[in-house]
Image (cartoon, grey):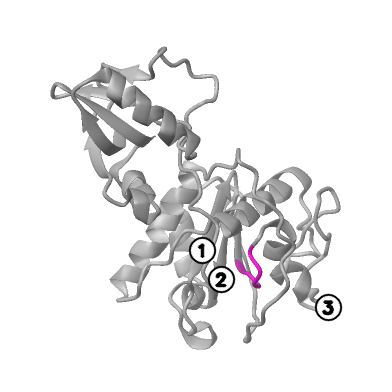
Amino acid sequence: MLTKKKFLISLSSILFFALAIGQNTKIPKSFRVSEKSIELFNLINDQRTANNLTKIKLSASLSFVAATHISDLVLNHPDTSLCNLHSWSDKGDWTACCYQPYIPNQDCMWNKPKELTPYKYRGYELAFYQDDELTAEEILKGLMDIPEASNMILNQGKWANEWRAMGVGAKNEYAVVWFGRAADNEPAPDFSHKASSEPKTETSLIEQETGMYYLIFGSYNRLKDAEKRLTRLQKDGFEDAVILWSDNKYRLTLSSHKTIELAKTAKSQLIKKYDEAWILKY
């Protein structure tokens, strides 16, 4: 019996790695990693851990490339009957290309990180499409059921060399995963998903439980002291930092997350200055 569902998978097949000169393109400050993308990122690392492999760090650069490619695929559909999922349209600030197995323009795909971000190395992409929107769990299962995709995720076969950076994008029927041989020197990507129009109190003080998971970085007896530190955190880039009133303390937060898994991932990406942050459900 035929079903409506179908799977398409596109894989890069390069066997070597080379450095490239980056263009120092800046990642927009407004860039955020979607929750679904983070879920898929966590599931891939869980799969690696289950196979006695180290987790790969989330890359801001490769995540931005993934999100950009996802938007191009969803809006412009450069993937046609001839061009596969590694293709890019001519409707953006990048090199357009029709990527096909017969005459593949491999550099067009490999060099997207250096075109779009400060990442100076080649990237390697898994691209996935399914005609019904899937959960992160279903996307991972679809990838793991395909031997070459599984090998890429688990560093097996021709993909045996270690990955040191990963970026993930997932939207509608598409998902892409980018891997890099070199670490990304860019700061960890932002995980916050609050709407920019969400109202805040004058002091950004939250006194009612929200059910969210917060990264806590400091507790104070006086609100005035917490507010001073909050201002410095916001200047350091924690734009969604707030203060929680909990256990008769003013708890200073770095970010908030809907699940414990998202909070743990955000904590693992903090720079050393903030690595003593702890998680509180409030």
53 lies above or below 226: below
Is 62 one of the magenta-colored residues? Answer: no
Q: Which mark is residue 166?
A: 1
Name the residue carrying label 2: 180
Residue flagged by tag 2: what amino acid is it? Gly
Q: Position of residue 224 (x, y in %)?
A: 30, 19
| SS label for mark 3 | loop
Horizontal side, residue 160 vs residue 92: left or right: left
Which residue is at a point 25% across and 36% down the rendered structure image?
218
Which residue is at a point 48% across and 85% down the rendered structure image?
160
In front of the other: 122 or 48:
122
Q: Which mark is residue 103?
A: 3
Q: Position of residue 239 (x, y in %)?
A: 48, 32
Q: Position of residue 244 (x, y in %)?
A: 27, 24
Task: Tell me which segment is drawn in magenta.
Answer: 119-125
Q: Are marks 1 and 2 in contact (CB under 8 Å)?
A: yes
**Quadrant in the picture for residue 118:** bottom right
Q: Quadrant of the C terminus?
A: top left
Q: Position of residue 5 (x, y in %)?
A: 57, 53
189 lies above or below 218: below
| SS label for mark 2 | strand
Tell me if mark 1 has few (under 14), some (14-19) or many (20+) residues whose alpha carbon lies within 10 angstroms of its own. many
- Please indicate, yes or no, whether residue 57 appears anywhere in the rendered image: yes
Instruction: State the residue lying farthest toward the right.
Output: 90
In front of the other: 141 or 198:
198
Of callouts 1 and 2, the N-terminal one: 1
| SS label for mark 1 | strand
